[in-house]
Image (spheres, grey):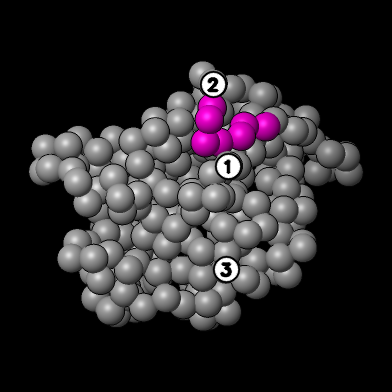
Amino acid sequence: MEYKLLKLERKEGVGIVLFDNAEQMNPTNPTTVAELTAAFTELNNDPEVKAVIITGGDHIFAAGGDIPYMSEAGVQEMEEFIADAGYMVSLITSSPKPYIAAIAGPALGGGTEISIACDIRIAADNAIFGQPEINLGIVPGCGGTQRLGRAIGWSRARYLVLTGEIIDAQTALSIGLVNKVVPVAELQETAFKLARSLARKSPAALRTAKEAMNYAENSSLSAGLEHEQKVWSLLFAGSDQKEGMKAFLEKRRPQYTGK
């Protein structure tokens, strides 16, 4: 696919999705959703890509919905749009590969929702977050009323969704919305080093860990623990477990195959 609003790069086992429409604040519209869907599908299916970074560079992540477009749209069009957007985001959460959001500048509305779908979030010190949809007479529609509470707790999520308040990077760190805050000049390097380190780990173990945690979000503790024990045991049928432990004993870097 030819990307017009994104740039796609692969480097050392890492796939990098770069929002590339900063002049328009990287808005979320049907074209953006279609391109992101294609990019995530491409990277998820690429055996050479072991981890993925989503970023907008050093100035803006994504400022949310394309309001000029949405203001003229009808119910059926918006129903189809948000279903497509939801599927696009599900490609992050259901991927067997770890996704890292490297966030600088505004990550608002859909920008926040894409970031909270990622497994790890690193923010630059100039990042801001929020779900300001309430100020436009709508509500978050791509996970903001669902994943945000799971990420930071329902009390904090209710406050952000109902007030539409914008928070800075340090506040986001303090409530657990992001995992780390770094100077903006260090954001891309920090994210890439982390992604590269993940790309060197066992794909089988990463896939299993992510799937088990996804399972935990939708099950009871007892069911989750039972599931964890089963998938833990199954890893011993694969070659990655044997290679990982052998490499540890031999004091060398393991060479994983993902099996």
Q: In the picture shown, does residue 248 fall above or below 136?
A: above
Q: Earlier in the sequence, mark 3 or mark 2?
A: 2
Amino acid type, residue under disc 1 in the picture: Asp
Residue 204: x, y in percent?
57, 33
Q: Return the residue nearer the eye: 201 or 1.
A: 1
The answer to if 196 sits in the magenta stretch is: no
Indicate the amino acid at tag 2. Glu
Q: Check whether the beta carbons of the residues at disc 1 and disc 2 lie within 8 A of each other.
A: no
Secondary structure beneath dot 1 equals loop
Q: How many marks?
A: 3
Q: Please give the name of the residue rendered at 77% of the width and 53% of the height, measured from the top-left corner.
A: 189
Q: Residue at x 57, y 64 (%)?
A: 105
| Residue that badge 1 annotates | 20
Position of the C terminus, as image quadrant, is top right
Q: Is residue 54 visible?
A: no
Instruction: State which tag comes first along the sequence, 1 or 2.
Output: 2
Q: Is 31 positioned to the left or the right of 193 in the image? A: left
For residue 7, which quarter of the picture? top right
Badge 2: how crowded within 10 Å, few (<14), some, or many (20+)? few
Label 3 secondary element: loop
- In the rendered image, residue 7 lying in the magenta stretch gets the answer yes
User: Mark 3 — residue?
Assistant: 127
Residue 115 image offset from top left, x and y in percent = 47, 55
The circle on residue 248 is none
Q: Which residues are magenta?
A: 3-9
Q: CA distance from mark 3 to mark 2?
A: 29 Å
Give the CA distance from mark 1 to mark 3.
17 Å
Name the residue furthest left: 75
The mark found on residue 2 in the picture is 2
Looking at the image, residue 220 sits to the left or right of residue 230; the answer is left
Dot in front, 3 or 2: 2
Looking at the image, which is closer to me, 60 or 232?
A: 60
